[in-house]
Amino acid sequence: MTTTASEIIGKLMEELRSVAKTETILGKEFVVGDFTLIPVSRISLGFGAGGGQGTENKKAGEGGGGGGGVVVTPIAFVIIKGGEISFQAIRKGGAFDALFEQLPEMVEKILAKGQENKVKSEDEAG
């Protein structure tokens, strides 16, 4: 069975494309109070492939190989409330640790702002 470098690269690209799709970059939305949050991630792809064949002493040989990798890094949230949309970046470094460190603080701020707006509306009404 002969596998060329272009066939290996083609298969790698097909597999990497299945990972690097819109649903990976824009994550599944979730709701916190009146807010809808959509996680945003950066995707980095890398791959390589090679193949060759040779003869020595009337014995033929051939080989090929390839590999690839994907890194998904959370970088921000799209925040939706009513008709307003905002973008909240996760602090530089973008590691999963930063996401989990910042998420509770963001949720608290969102809930506090929602409560503040509710009290303000009640005061204006009456």
Image: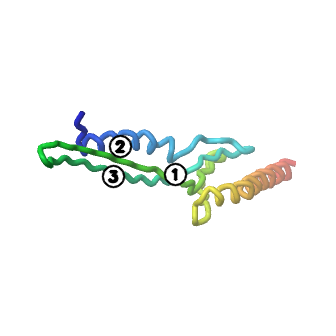
Q: Position of residue 47 (x, y in %)?
A: 36, 51
Q: Nearer the viewer, mark 3 or mark 1?
A: 3
User: The disc labelled 2 sits on which kind of residue?
Assistant: Leu
Left or right: 14 in relation to 41: left
User: The disc labelled 1 sits on which kind of residue?
Assistant: Val
Kindly check if marks 3 and 2 are in contact, taking CB atoms under 8 A apart as contact. Answer: no
Kindly check if marks 2 and 1 are in contact, taking CB atoms under 8 A apart as contact. Answer: no
* Residue bearing mark 1: 72
Q: Could you tell me which secondary element the residue under label 3 belongs to?
A: strand
Residue 96: image quadrant is bottom right
User: 35 above or below 112?
Assistant: above
* Residue bearing mark 3: 48
Disc 2/disc 1 C-alpha distance (Å): 17 Å
Disc 3/disc 2 C-alpha distance (Å): 9 Å
Q: As drawn, which residue projects farthest toward the bottom?
A: 92
Q: Earlier in the sequence, mark 3 or mark 2?
A: 2
Q: As drawn, which residue projects farthest toward the front?
A: 57
Disc 3/disc 1 C-alpha distance (Å): 19 Å
- Label 1, residues with CA under 10 Å away: few <14, some 14-19, many ≥20: some
Q: Nearer the viewer, mark 2 or mark 1?
A: 2
